[in-house]
Amino acid sequence: MVQLDSRISVFHKKNEGVSVARNFGVNKATGQYILFVDGDDILTPWLLESAVQAVEDYDCDVIVGMINTTDKRPSIFPSREKNVKFELLDDHKKKELECHIFSKSCERWRPDQDGWEFNGEGCWAHFLKKEIALENQFIPGVAVGEDTIWALTMLNSSKDYRIGMLYEKWYYYIQNDYSVLNKYNPKIVGQLTLPVDILEKKYGASTGIVHVAYTDWLLMKLKHICFRAYLAEENTDPFNKKVSEFSKVLHTAPWIEVLNRRNTQPFKKRLKFFLYDKNIALYFYSCLKLVNYFNALYQGIPIGGYTKMIANLLDGIKVRLNTDYQEHKSELDALADKVVYTGPIDAYFDYKLGTLEYRSVRFETELLDQPNFQGNAAVNYTDRETQWTRIIEHKWFEFGKDENGNDLPKTIISREYSSEWKPGDEPYYPVNDAKNSLLYSEYKKLADAENKVIFGGRLGEYKYYDMDQVIAAVLEKCEKEFVGENV
Ligand SMILES: Cc1cc2nc3c(=O)[nH]c(=O)nc-3n(C[C@H](O)[C@H](O)[C@H](O)COP(=O)(O)OP(=O)(O)OC[C@H]3O[C@@H](n4cnc5c(N)ncnc54)[C@H](O)[C@@H]3O)c2cc1C
């Protein structure tokens, strides 16, 4: 090329990433204008001539042309159009383009011309004055999304650049399979959150339109990573391993902060839907459940666990363990005006109307001589082949450290199996079908007639409660019970 045209210079440098390479090029350039071109992309023959003309005619700092994203190299160029439309970006249009970068939803920037559009996300098809390129360098070390950050920074610059959009076909962006995004790399997953940091600096951590758009963008990237890395045929890891790896990524900073700190419910729901769509839902649904297992907005467990919390509540109160209330009923009833009964309601009445049914689970617990088994408190297994429904790795509820903050060398896991319940087994989950609901309502009538006893909790009320719900129910019952009293 150098031999063909003496104005061309070729520089070689050691690989320090795409951002450093782009900055290197800008610093070496001696001309008035800069255009970034990826080695495998194709320019329409008129791009440069048209761009120079437009910068001068419209007195712009940056001219943006249309791109065509394709996985095939074009065999012929489209014909060059005459009198192409031009738009100078005012503040409103800059904002629109900013949203479009993430959501690709703005009609203005996707005129329907055989896939030609203003992408805005990259630096391709941006023709700019060299001083603007020098003022807006790429962040070294950022390997993915560096061009999105670059485009956003320029749009948001306090210098208020004159940016013009030229509705002309300029640039074929050729997608290929060896892009960084097509390979699994947790570092890259983390870097995908950088563009939103720029938005946060500008807008604060709000959930405005840009954040909604960002969620779309995040979804798109995550879809990519899911399919190209975890589900790629070349990735021969066992499926469970892939699931566990993916869930680890989702639990990695700063990704986890992104999922936690924003209202990502729509994102998660849509990801779930998308995965269902592709018939691989069951596996990845379990990953999503890891992100938000109970589908609740806020989650947490008390520091030290529930045992510690209950121990604190019972401090100074006499506790008798391994004492069956039914067996010692008259003795225990004599101790108080009111009794709170949290055992099975049918057992209280000696099953005289019949036996309520439950669903049950069985646990197999193992102590493993390794610090980490799955990196998470809970991993669900929804495939047909695996016998257990989930594995709990208990240490991760407490962040895997002992009370002095040291890593624990061993780990305990519990495999959870669904099991048939029969009378005498540990009752776990009530069966809320018509038959059992009817039977419960009959027991409830008997319970309401017991003035001294308050029936409470999942067994006493034959009701599925999560921890937060059962705590709320207790507080409500207390309020009702102690109404008017100074407690
Ligand atoms: C397998 C399983 C997993 C769960 N996972 C979650 C979860 O991940 N997140 C969540 O939020 N919730 C979860 N839950 C629900 C949560 O555990 C319950 O909401 C909560 O424990 C209900 O509290 P409770 O006081 O009603 O019942 P329990 O916690 O069951 O307490 C009832 C108490 O009454 C005692 N008792 C019963 N009969 C007698 C008797 N005759 N004499 C003396 N004592 C008696 C029992 O020994 C027990 O201590 C889970 C429940 C189960 C069964």
Image: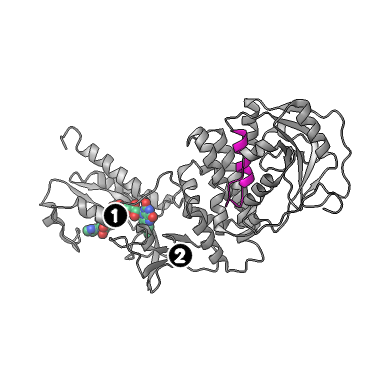
Label at residue 216: none
Task: Give the mark, 2 or 1, whose residue is nearer the N terminus.
Answer: 1
Q: Give x and y (percent) for residue 426.
A: 33, 63
User: Is 118 in front, or is 289?
Assistant: 118
Tell me if label 2 and label 1 are in contact, CB under 8 Å. Answer: no
**Position of residue 371 in the picture relative to residue 222 (left or right):** left
- Note whether 187 is above or below 476 in the view shown: below
Query: Can you give x and y, in whole percent of width and height, for residue 309 in the image?
Result: 25, 52
Q: Quadrant of ligand 1?
A: bottom left
Which of 12 and 236 lies nearest the eye of the viewer? Answer: 12
The answer to which quarter of the image holds residue 241 is bottom right
- The magenta stretch is 137-156
Tell me: is circle 1 under 8 Å from ligand 1: no
Q: Nearer the viewer, residue 223 or 332?
A: 223
Task: Find disc 2 in the rendering and name its residue.
Answer: 374
> How many neighbours does mark 1 have within 10 angstroms: few (below 14), some (14-19), or many (20 or more)?
few
* Mark 1: secondary structure: helix
Q: Residue at x 20, y 59 (%)?
A: 326
In this figure, which residue is indicated by the disc labeled 1?
A: 306
Is residue 229 in sight in this rendering? yes
Magenta-colored stretch includes residue 152: yes
Where, quadrant-wise, is the C terminus in this rendering?
Answer: top left
The answer to which quarter of the image holds residue 430 is bottom left
